[in-house]
Image (tube, rainbow, N blue to C red):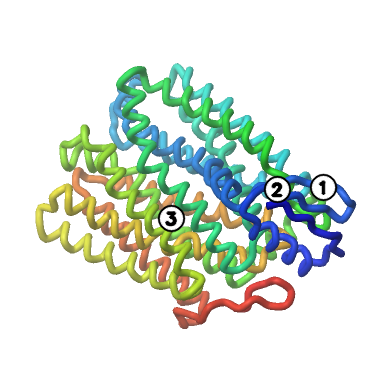
Amino acid sequence: MVARMGHFPFTERSYVARNRAIGQQPAMFHATTPSGQAIAVPGRRETVVLLAGLMALNAFAIDAMIPALPAIGAELGVAEDNRRQLIVVMYMLGFGVGQLFWGPLADRFGRKPILAIGVALYAGFALLCGVASSFELLIAGRVAMGMSAAVTRVLVVAMVRDLFEGEAMAKVMSLVFMTFMLVPVLAPNIGQAILLVGPWRAIFLVLAGYGAIMWLWSFIRLPETLHPEFRRPLSVHAISGAARTASLDRLSLGYTLAMTAVFGGLTAYIASIQQIVFDTYDAPHLIGLVFAAVAAPMALASWGNSRVIGKYGLRRVGHGGLIAFVAITALHAIIAHLIAEPLWLFCTLMGLTLMAFAFTTSNFATLAMTNMVAIAGTASSVQGVVGTIGGALIGLVIGQAFDGTQIPFLIGLAACGIVGLIGVLMTERGKLFGAIDAMADDGSVKT
């Protein structure tokens, strides 16, 4: 289908109306900007897959490494197992810090050129990691790689905010996260497969190649989604003002802090799972299967979330997911303390935990961005920095508590859920399961 849109006086409300029309198109169509320029816009399906593929750059960079950690440690002289966690955690810290820069740049110069620069740097630093001759150089490369990959988190969220509103935004966010969450099912197995035919350095070459493919696809197919009316000057005053707005808005602040706590649990899982499978259960050959068994339910839940939020609303689904997260993690910690938990039961309960996680995160991300349409890039940066750095530090603390058993990890996971629930209760002033959000006349979501 090809549609043609007329000229809009670009108030925020008309911007929302035009982008709603964009989101409803099933195939490529042509839209007309206020200046009369026709732009080709991918349909929703390709847009979702492309945005998810960009976010998957980050997931591949984390999860494909996990089977290679022992080999990396052996070649680069890292004898202490817990120190190998830095390969994951320092990448995530770089990922958090990098988000400080990409959002304001994207609000000034547009989404497309900044995305292209970031993805190109990601591919370049992947190559650097692949030739690193020391553990210190590898860690430096991982930090830089994470800072580059941060462009995908900031701009994917900002572009979804640019193009969609309310529950439509939550549905697209869920579909993006669903595709993104399929990556943990595949990445460790891909990493293991690469190790069968080549050294650990080959994993970084594959990541560089994937980055090059995503750079080309996004450069050719993605249009510029930031309208000139919302471009912001690159000044300390403008950036600090937008950051202050994102930091003081009740929904933005509250749901960002809640996501930070829950994300800390996910980071702890990523940092600890290799040691749990290798050392606690003495089953290194099952690492790929464990990842798939735990991550597949999370991907399925993300798809289910996109189907139910229209009926039940962002709050009802998101709050229910968080309560389930708290209940399952607490039960898991108790079970592991009382019995010698077999691996199949660990995988089952972790799969249920990450299912609850999936029903929580995309809805909380949508609620956090509700009032941020005019400063989407900077707001995404602020939220991403807090969530990623905070989550990485929480995950590092939990991961470093590993004592040969899964119990410190499970206790930390339950604590993350409880802290997140407290944050939501404070944000919602003690009231959970709010009604389905209604759209206000200015395009914002009534809260």
- Residue type (three-letter) at the residue carrying disc 1: Ala
Q: Residue furthest left?
A: 339
Residue 344: where, in percent of width, then height?
17, 49
Which type of secondary structure does the marked residue at label 3 adopt?
Answer: helix
Quarter where residue 111 is shown: top right
Is 386 above or below relative to 50? below
- N-terminal of the pair, mark 2 or mark 3, is 2
Question: In this orientation, which residue lies closer to the viewer: 264 or 152?
Answer: 152
Q: CA distance from mark 1 to mark 3?
A: 40 Å
Q: Residue at x 64, y 38 (%)?
A: 218
Q: Helix or strand or loop: what does disc 1 sit on?
A: strand
Q: Single out the mark in the foreground, 2 or 3.
A: 2
Which amino acid, mark 2?
A: Val
Which residue is label 3 attached to?
263
Q: Residues within 10 Å of mark 2 (few under 14, many from 20)?
A: many
Q: Are marks 2 and 3 in contact (CB under 8 Å)?
A: no
Q: Would you call the spot at circle 1 few (<14 residues within 10 Å), some (14-19), or many (20 or more)?
A: some
Residue denoted by label 2: 41
Q: Can see residue 178?
A: yes
Q: Amino acid at mark 3?
A: Phe
* Residue holding disc 1: 38
